[in-house]
Image: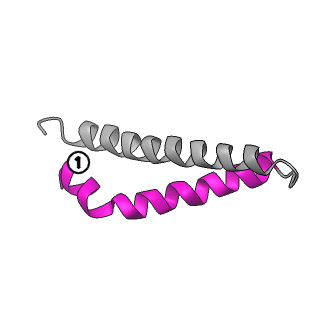
Amino acid sequence: MTFAEHTKRNWLITLFAAIFFAAIVSMIFLNDPHKTVTVAMVFIAAALLLFGAILGVWYLIHKRKNPQA
């Protein structure tokens, strides 16, 4: 499966995984309920960064296993 096929089929699963890990990061490091906007911004930023990181790591691993692709 190429990287394009993987992202076309599994982008929603990857997004949910990133949201799940972003929720964990937000709950561990920002457990103050009075800073709702800060928690929301960190959550969104963490979700986007983790989404990119998951796809990036998968791409690098796939590239290493299959160098001609």
Residue under label 1: 3
In the structure shown, which secondary structural element does the residue marked by tag 1 occupy? helix
Q: Tell me what residue is drawn at x 46 percent, y 41 percent.
A: 53
Q: x%, y% of residue 33? A: 86, 55
Would residue 67 be found to the left or right of residue 53 on screen?
Answer: left
Q: Position of residue 43 (x, y in %)?
A: 64, 49
Q: Residues within 10 Å of mark 1 (few under 14, many from 20)?
A: some
Q: Quadrant of residue 20?
A: bottom right
Q: Vertically, is 56 above or below 43?
A: above
As for residue 37 lying within the magenta part, the answer is: no
Position of the C terminus by quadrant:
top left
Q: Nearer the viewer, residue 3 or 51?
A: 51
The residue under the point 88% across, 51% down is 34
Q: Amino acid at mark 1?
A: Phe
Q: Relative to 13, does residue 53 appear above or below in the rendering?
A: above
Q: Look at the image and give the residue range highlighted in magenta.
A: 1-30
How many numbered callouts? 1
Residue 19 falls within the magenta-colored stretch = yes
Horizontal side of 39 relative to 7 (left or right) equals right
Q: How is the image coloured?
A: one colour
Single out the residue that lies furthest toward the front: 37
Q: Position of residue 66 (x, y in %)?
A: 19, 41
